Image (cartoon, grey):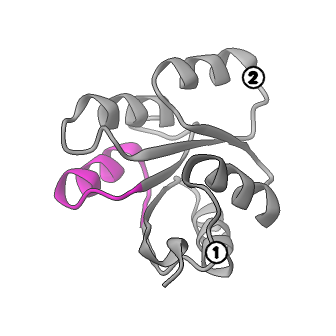
């Protein structure tokens, strides 16, 4: 069993298209355990009920944005060790710095390629194969 098959991934994005693209890319990389949430609040509820190893979250969402979710994940003892990748269309240095301060493991720019997603995940977990 590959590392990718063992990792439980939570995708958090308010746009259905983005969730589908992320899920498809993860599937192509060999991930089998993928859950999706439509916003940060829903994502945190899922993480509290069944913690995942990796969260890939959009930054800009209603209710709770990606940084709010990152902070909630990091302050919860049951979820604080989850790897966290922020997804953003904004190449904003301040956002990247804030994400790093809050404990993000990586930042992935939209639009992304499968290769860039793989590199962002492997930077956190090591080689997937």
When asked about the image quadrant of residue 73, the answer is: top left
Magenta segment range? 36-53
Residue 46 vertical placement versus 98 (above, below):
below
Picture coordinates of residue 68 (x, y %)?
Answer: 40, 29
Image quadrant where one finds the C terminus: bottom right
Residue 28 vertical placement versus 75 (above, below):
below
Picture coordinates of residue 113 (x, y %)?
Answer: 82, 61
- Magenta span includes 49: yes
**Front residue of this view, candidates 12 and 26:** 26
Near mark 1 (Cα within 10 A), the count class, few <14, some 14-19 or many ≥20, is few
Numbered circle sitting on residue 7: none
Mark 1 falls on what kind of element? loop
Tell me if I can see residue 113 in this picture. no
Q: Residue furthest bottom?
A: 1
**Front residue of this view, candidates 83 and 69:** 83
Q: Is residue 55 left or right of residue 42?
A: right
Residue 28 vertical placement versus 15 (above, below):
below
Numbered circle sitting on residue 129: 1
Residue behind mark 2: 92
When asked about the image quadrant of residue 93, the answer is: top right
């Amino acid at each position: 069993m590959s590392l990718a098959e063992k990792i439980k991934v939570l995708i958090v994005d308010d746009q259905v298209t983005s969730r589908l693209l992320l899920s498809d890319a993860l599937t192509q990389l060999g991930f089998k355990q993928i859950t999706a949430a439509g916003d940060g609040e829903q994502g945190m509820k899922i993480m509290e009920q069944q913690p995942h190893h990796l969260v890939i979250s959009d930054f800009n969402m209603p209710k709770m944005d990606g940084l709010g979710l990152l902070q909630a994940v990091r302050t919860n003892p049951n979820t604080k060790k989850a790897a966290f990748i922020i997804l953003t269309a904004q190449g904003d240095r301040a956002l990247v710095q804030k994400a790093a301060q809050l404990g993000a493991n990586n930042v992935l720019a939209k639009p992304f390629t499968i290769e860039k997603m793989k590199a962002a995940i492997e930077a956190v977990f090591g080689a997937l194969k």
